[in-house]
Amino acid sequence: MDVKRCVWAVLFAFHSGVAYGYELQSKPDPSDARATARWMVSQNLWGVLSTISIDLGGAPFGNVVSFSDGPPGQGSGIPYFYLSLLDPTPRDVLKDSRCSFTISEAPLGTCGDTDPENPTCSKLTLTGKIGRRIIISNISS
């Protein structure tokens, strides 16, 4: 028997654009900040998404989240997050869409033996507002 269910998926994406690919792409020249930022977004799988917490009286709240900017090697430069409303982060965003998203080069292993806190090991913080995308799909089981 084929049972069709409607599944609601909520994706949040930054409006300002800049996921571990199967094969790490070569790092751009660090003096090219835009290329380096896009490279970091395309190669990473997770980061810290910080919001203004409704549960903590407006205090900042950072949450480790997975993200993707598209299939490996075909990234859009825009990080997308698959978030559940059971998690505090999307609930915060529904009240105040301002947030920041921070990633580091350290998990990629491209900093070599350099201390991850060394400025030559790149870090990136995107700030802006998150927008909501609702995707409806039918699943047969």
Image (cartoon, helix red, strand yellow):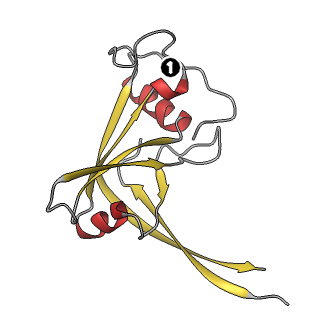
Q: Give x and y (percent) for residue 101.
A: 35, 44
26 or 113: which is nearer to us?
113
Q: Residue at coordinates 40% horizontally, 35% vertically from top-left?
A: 103
Residue 118 falls in which quadrant of the image? top left
Relative height, residue 44 to residue 139 (above, below): above
**Which residue lies most toward the top here?**
113
Secondary structure of residue under mark 1:
loop
Relative height, residue 79 to residue 118 (above, below): below
Pointer 1 residue = 28
23 or 56: which is nearer to us?
56
Quadrant assignment for the C terminus: bottom right
Mark 1 residue crowding within 10 angstroms, few (<14) / some (14–19) / many (20+): some
Q: Amino acid at mark 1?
A: Pro
Q: Residue at coordinates 28% horizontally, 64% vertically from top-left?
A: 92
Residue 30 falls in which quadrant of the image? top left
Q: Residue at coordinates 67% horizontally, 85% vertically from top-left?
A: 5
Tell me: 137 left or right of 118: right
Q: Residue at coordinates 53% horizontally, 46% vertically from top-left?
A: 76
